[in-house]
Image (tube, grey):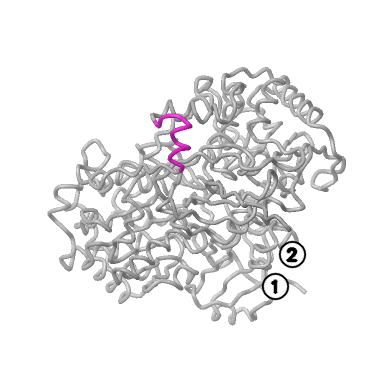
């Protein structure tokens, strides 16, 4: 008689760079193998729903092409020719090259580089500890969140909003500048519940008719970089037609009269000219928002990824302050809950070792930095050695032509700690095999909700894979970098961080499984005042003195009141199209690029083109086309699509560079210009030309 193997269901948290940070139930089949992955019903935000790519995680964690042993490059840079070596050989060489760079060019010639391939605090942020102890060049993260965060907090005073589960209690859910069907599916869970149980409407505001819009009742399609104009046109109607809650504004906002006077010239006609949204749609949507007290604004990152992104977020966030929607359950706004965690990462990051005289290098300007741009290098020495964890800059960073040139330097030593042979790993000198999240312990938070959790190790890693923390410990010994954090296990780091943060200890958090930190209703809705010193929501933004971040990008030029700030990269005769590089459904940046199911769903890289634009250029559906600007060019397949405004192109990304004909990916077209007021990258703000590919 055959005996069935008992499936063990273990809890975890998705570590990927997504606000949902889904609570997971994982089938553990044996010490090295998982089965199905489901969203946990025990956690009220995840509510049993998880995206398809994570549901198929066994396909990724047990992928036959995972890196499983250290390697040294033996061929030309980028050739992919490597030979297997031992961990000791690999670590000895990395340490030797770091010490050599330090001896010849100073410690700041070494630049540890990372990002959010995992959102776990120990494995993501621990690299900063090595940076701080060794006085290497510090890392200023700008590639994702800065612009959106400061745009929201400049109004509210902090990055926190209404409990996102209150979407289910709303009468109108406005999903603005995000495509959660692709990027954070749980938003749709709660919005759909409101529609089913309350008859609520779902509205989507975005630059193309995406998968979220296909599930919405109301669609607002605008040109990239014009959300501020659209928001101002709406607020003009709200004031003009008596929908503005003057009593609320008098108590809770800083300058309602000045805002009203300013908006008198920001008519729907003015907004329509800029945004492309018809006047009738602006009027109707403003009326609906004005009449619906329980309107929930779910604001995303996408519409902030332009040179005027912070002002766009601020303008949109002003609308519920004008209507007073914050007063009502199911009303108000939410972007992110970063202000709830209060994590003290001083041990993880080695804050006691920070030397503030060491330079900060801008993550987004890696191409300029590696090609010797003096301004990007802050006037300091060239970067001569790097350790890269949790990111793939050879594909995801802007200004890819410069990035390629920089990594091709023979005098640059690069070690990459990775799970797969990414395009960044392929150009490295040393490649180290990394664990995945079920193969180590870590501490997680949900940016899109209010839970914290421990993600425990569930299975053993394959081959010789080591965690980020293990690599740092081994390098620290060789580099003579001394800090208590290097002597601690991940669980000890988690425990110490929780205690220093006022969250108890690791045992208590593991007992909770997922701990809900959502404040009470009055706090979440700012009914006792907003987080600025005056207790007001600020219609009038003080961009020169943001609540956090490093001031950069000429904030004195930014409009203080909500407006359309015309600093986007404008089209011209040579570049008549605006390109946005929106997220694909089955990829997450370049994570999941390697899984067969994601590859099959996404197919070849393509670009959405309005049929009339395509016809004017003689382009047929399915033809290979080329896009270009002064930064570079790339080839994609044309996809005729009337769900965009004319003159707008959408390329859902990020495919590997190698998937594009010619090997040049979409970020060959994107810029690394500094976005005011605290830096950022304008991935959706590009002027390009479009033509049929030769041949």
Which residue was labeled with disc 1?
A: 624
Residue situated in front as seen by the camera: 149 or 69: 69
Using the rendered view, name the quadrant where residue 118 is placed. Answer: top right
Q: Position of residue 314 (x, y in %)?
A: 34, 51
Direction from residue 321 to residue 250 in the image, left or right: left
Q: Quadrant of the C terminus?
A: bottom right
Above or below residue 560? Residue 329 is: below
Circle 2 crowding by C-alpha within 10 Å: few under 14, some 14–19, many from 20: some
Q: Position of residue 375 (x, y in %)?
A: 57, 36
Above or below residue 459? Residue 483 is: above
Q: Position of residue 397 (x, y in %)?
A: 61, 48
Q: Which mark is residue 661?
A: 2
Label 2 close to label 1 by CB (< 8 Å) = yes
Residue situated in front as seen by the camera: 529 or 641: 529
Q: Is residue 2 visible?
A: yes
Q: Position of residue 448 (x, y in %)?
A: 43, 50
Residue situated in front as seen by the camera: 155 or 84: 84
Using the rendered view, name the quadrant where residue 323 is placed. Answer: bottom left
The stretch in magenta equals 503-513
Above or below residue 47? Residue 461 is: above
Circle 1 crowding by C-alpha within 10 Å: few under 14, some 14–19, many from 20: many
**Secondary structure that dominates the magenta span:** helix
Sequence-wise, the earlier of marks 2 and 1 is 1
Q: Quadrant of the N terminus?
A: bottom right
């Amino acid at each position: 008689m055959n005996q069935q193997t008992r499936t063990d269901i273990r809890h975890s948290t998705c570590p990927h760079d997504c606000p949902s940070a889904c609570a997971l139930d994982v089938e553990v089949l044996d010490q090295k193998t998982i089965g199905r992955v489901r969203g946990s019903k025990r956690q009220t935000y995840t509510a049993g729903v998880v995206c398809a790519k994570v549901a198929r995680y066994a396909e990724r964690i047990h992928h036959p092409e995972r890196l499983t042993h250290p390697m040294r490059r033996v061929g030309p840079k980028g050739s992919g020719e490597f030979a297997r070596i031992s961990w000791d050989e690999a670590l000895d060489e990395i340490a030797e090259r770091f010490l050599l760079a330090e001896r010849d060019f100073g410690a700041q010639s070494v630049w540890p580089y990372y990002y959010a391939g995992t959102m776990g605090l120990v494995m993501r942020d621990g690299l900063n500890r090595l940076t701080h102890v060794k006085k290497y060049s510090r890392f200023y993260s700008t590639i994702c969140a800065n612009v959106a965060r400061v745009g929201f907090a400049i109004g509210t005073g902090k990055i926190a909003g209404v409990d996102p589960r209150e979407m289910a209690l709303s009468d109108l859910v406005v999903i603005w500048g995000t495509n959660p069907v692709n990027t954070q599916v749980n938003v749709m869970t709660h919005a759909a519940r409101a529609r089913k149980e309350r008859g609520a409407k779902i509205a989507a505001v975005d630059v193309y008719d995406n998968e979220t819009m296909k599930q919405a009742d109301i669609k607002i399609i605008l040109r990239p970089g014009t959300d501020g104009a659209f928001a101002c046109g709406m607020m003009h109607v709200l004031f003009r037609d008596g929908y503005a809650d003057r009593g609320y504004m008098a108590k809770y906002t800083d300058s309602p009269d000045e805002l009203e006077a300013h908006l008198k010239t920001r008519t729907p006609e003015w907004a329509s000219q800029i945004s492309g949204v018809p006047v009738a749609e602006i009027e109707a949507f403003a009326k609906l928002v004005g009449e619906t007290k329980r309107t929930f604004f779910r604001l995303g990152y996408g519409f902030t990824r332009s040179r005027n992104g912070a002002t766009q977020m601020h303008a949109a966030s002003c609308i519920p302050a004008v209507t007073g929607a914050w007063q009502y359950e199911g009303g108000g706004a939410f972007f992110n809950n970063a202000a709830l965690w209060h994590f003290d990462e001083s041990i993880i990051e080695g804050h006691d070792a920070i030397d503030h005289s060491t330079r900060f290098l801008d993550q987004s300007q890696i191409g300029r930095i590696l090609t010797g741009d003096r301004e990007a290098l802050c006037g300091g020495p060239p970067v001569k050695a790097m350790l890269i964890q949790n990111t793939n800059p050879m594909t995801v960073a802007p200004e890819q032509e410069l990035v390629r040139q920089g990594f091709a330097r023979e005098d640059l030593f690069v070690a990459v700690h990775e799970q797969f042979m990414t395009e960044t790993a392929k150009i490295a000198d040393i490649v180290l095999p990394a664990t995945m999240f079920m193969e180590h312990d870590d501490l997680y938070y949900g940016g899109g909700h209010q839970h914290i959790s421990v993600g425990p190790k569930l299975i053993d890693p394959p081959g010789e894979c080591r965690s980020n923390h293990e690599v740092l410990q081994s390098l620290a010994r060789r580099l003579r970098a001394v800090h208590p954090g290097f002597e601690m296990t991940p669980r000890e780091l988690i425990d110490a961080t929780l205690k220093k943060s006022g969250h108890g200890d690791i045992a208590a958090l593991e007992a909770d499984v997922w701990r809900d930190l959502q404040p009470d209703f009055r706090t979440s809705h700012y009914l006792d005042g907003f987080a600025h010193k005056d207790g007001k929501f600020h219609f009038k933004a003080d961009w020169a003195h943001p609540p956090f971040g490093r001031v950069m990008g000429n904030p004195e030029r930014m409009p203080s009141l909500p407006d359309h700030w015309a600093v986007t990269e404008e089209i011209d005769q040579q570049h008549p199209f605006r390109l946005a590089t929106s997220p694909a459904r089955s990829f997450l940046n370049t994570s999941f690029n390697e899984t067969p199911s994601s590859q099959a769903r996404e197919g070849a890289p393509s670009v959405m083109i309005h049929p009339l634009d395509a016809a004017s250029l003689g382009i047929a559906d399915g033809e290979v086309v080329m896009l270009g600007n002064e930064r570079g060019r790339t080839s994609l397949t044309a996809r005729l699509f009337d769900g965009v405004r004319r003159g707008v192109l959408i390329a859902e990304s990020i495919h590997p560079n190698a998937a594009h004909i010619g090997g040049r990916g979409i970020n060959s077209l994107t810029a690394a210009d500094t976005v005011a007021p605290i830096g950022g990258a304008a991935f959706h703000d590009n002027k390009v030309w479009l033509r049929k590919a030769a041949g």
